[in-house]
């Protein structure tokens, strides 16, 4: 008797294996430093950072952006530029930015009305930074045939 598996299951197993191997390359220290780098200077966000849940949400979005960049890095090997690849995953990328931004708005209880545009740009730069880092690491892994 053999076990019947579907292609979806195999694809998901392969994706999980790849994500685990890629995530070994980032550290919690790097996550903390980037949060401080991007959101530490903002008076509004630094006041919110007292809540540990907000910092963890930033980590979650960073990890998702990193994995998104790493997953789409294979298109860079086919000759597409960084911007073309980012355009490919624009929907998921925008979702991550919006998620982080809306999370800050929710926990800020409306006190950030004056800073909402600059807060959105900070969230966009944060996600962009992690996406680019994931893209570069994924591209390097593909070139070394570690995928």
Image (cartoon, grey):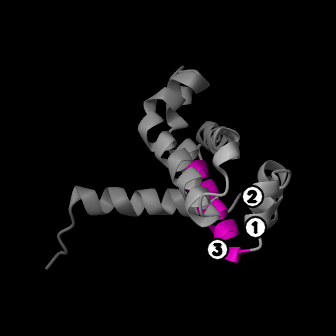
Q: Can you identify the residue that label 1 sits on?
A: 49
**Quadrant of res 36:** bottom right
Give the left or right position of residue 1, taking residue 116 as reference: left
87 is higher (above) or lower (below) than 122: above
**Quadrant of res 32:** bottom right
- Of callouts 3 and 2, which one flags the residue occurring earlier in the amino acid sequence? 2
Q: Can you identify the residue that label 3 sits on?
A: 53
Badge 2: how crowded within 10 Å, few (<14), some, or many (20+)?
some
Badge 3: how crowded within 10 Å, few (<14), some, or many (20+)?
few
- Please name the residue shown 58% across and 21% down the image: 81
| Residue 66 x, y percent position in the rendering | 61, 50
Q: Residue furthest bottom?
A: 1
Q: Distance between the residues labelled 1 and 3?
A: 8 Å
Magenta range is: 51-66
| Residue 114 x, y percent position in the rendering | 69, 44
Q: Can you identify the residue that label 2 sits on?
A: 45
Q: Nearer the viewer, residue 112 or 81?
A: 112
């Amino acid at each position: 008797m053999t076990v019947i598996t579907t292609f979806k299951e195999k694809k998901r197993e392969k994706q999980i294996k790849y994500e685990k191997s890629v995530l070994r390359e980032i550290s919690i220290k790097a996550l903390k430093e980037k949060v401080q780098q991007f959101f530490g200077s903002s008076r509004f966000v630094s006041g919110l950072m007292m809540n540990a849940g907000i910092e963890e949400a930033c980590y979650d979005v960073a990890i998702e952006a990193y994995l998104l960049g790493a997953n789409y890095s294979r298109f860079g090997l086919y000759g597409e530029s960084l911007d073309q690849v980012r355009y490919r995953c624009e929907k998921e990328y925008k979702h991550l930015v919006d998620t982080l931004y809306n999370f800050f708005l929710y926990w800020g209880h409306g006190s950030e009305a004056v800073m909402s545009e600059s807060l959105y740009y900070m969230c966009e730069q944060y996600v962009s930074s992690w996406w680019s880092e994931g893209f570069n690491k994924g591209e390097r892994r593909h070139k070394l045939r570690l995928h």
